[in-house]
Amino acid sequence: MKRNASIDTPLFQVLTEIGIIAQLSGALFNKVLPEGLHVSHFAILNHLARIGDGQTPLQIAGAMQVAKGTMTHSLGVLERRGLVVLEPHPDDRRSKRVMLTDAGRAFRIAAVDILAQAMGGFSSEIDEADLGLLVPKLAELRKVLDANR
């Protein structure tokens, strides 16, 4: 069977590793999150904390690459937990804006701490300085992928 040379490229290898890391870390994160909350819910909170409050559900759905109905469901879960509020959009009465609550901000910080504790046993196997060197290159790759979706 003939091998396809494109699977040996550094880009494909990096994307494969990122995919595996995302799957493994997501499974770990799901284990430590409270019942009924998933990595996808945390991702919404993290997105709002990074980008800022006031995005519409449709904007967040686009950023998360999910259908609007899926986002509506996820935002409902977060709203019922008091982690976000949906407010009327001041410029478009048909739309809403999503705002993090103080509880949502605190939950996000606590979730990161819980994940750090869960991964604490791995700290002797992973050099923090090496990880820090990866961040700028990973951010660059994310920006290129985001611009070309």
Image: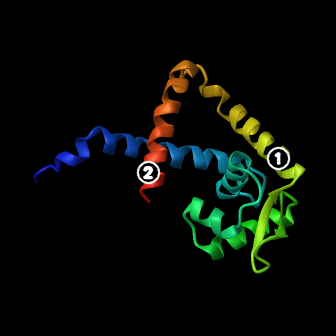
- Residue 79 position, x and y percent, is 83, 65
From the image, tell me which residue sits under label 1.
105
Identify the residue shown where x is 65% and y is 70%. 58
From the image, tell me which residue sits under label 2.
145
Identify the residue shown where x is 44% and y is 42%. 141
Where 32 falls versus 79 (above or below)?
above
- Residue 14 position, x and y percent, is 38, 40
Where 15 falls versus 129 (above or below)?
below
Mark-to-mark CA distance, 1 and 2: 28 Å
Quarter in which the C terminus is drawn: bottom left
Mark whose residue sits in front, 1 or 2: 2
Residue farthest bottom in this picture: 94
Label disc, if present, on residue 119 of the rendered structure: none
- Residue 97 position, x and y percent, is 77, 66
- Residue 106 position, x and y percent, is 85, 44
Where 53 falls versus 28 (above or below)?
below
Residue sitting nearer the eye, 68 or 97: 97
Q: Label 2: few (<14), some or many (≥20) within 10 Å?
A: few
Residue sitting nearer the eye, 40 or 26: 40
Count of numbered marks: 2
Dot 1 amino acid type: Arg
Residue sitting nearer the eye, 116 or 35: 116
Q: Label 1: few (<14), some or many (≥20) within 10 Å?
A: some
Q: Does the CB distance between marks 1 and 2 fall below 8 Å?
A: no
Query: Relative to 98, is 134 on the left or the right?
Result: left
Residue farthest left in this picture: 2
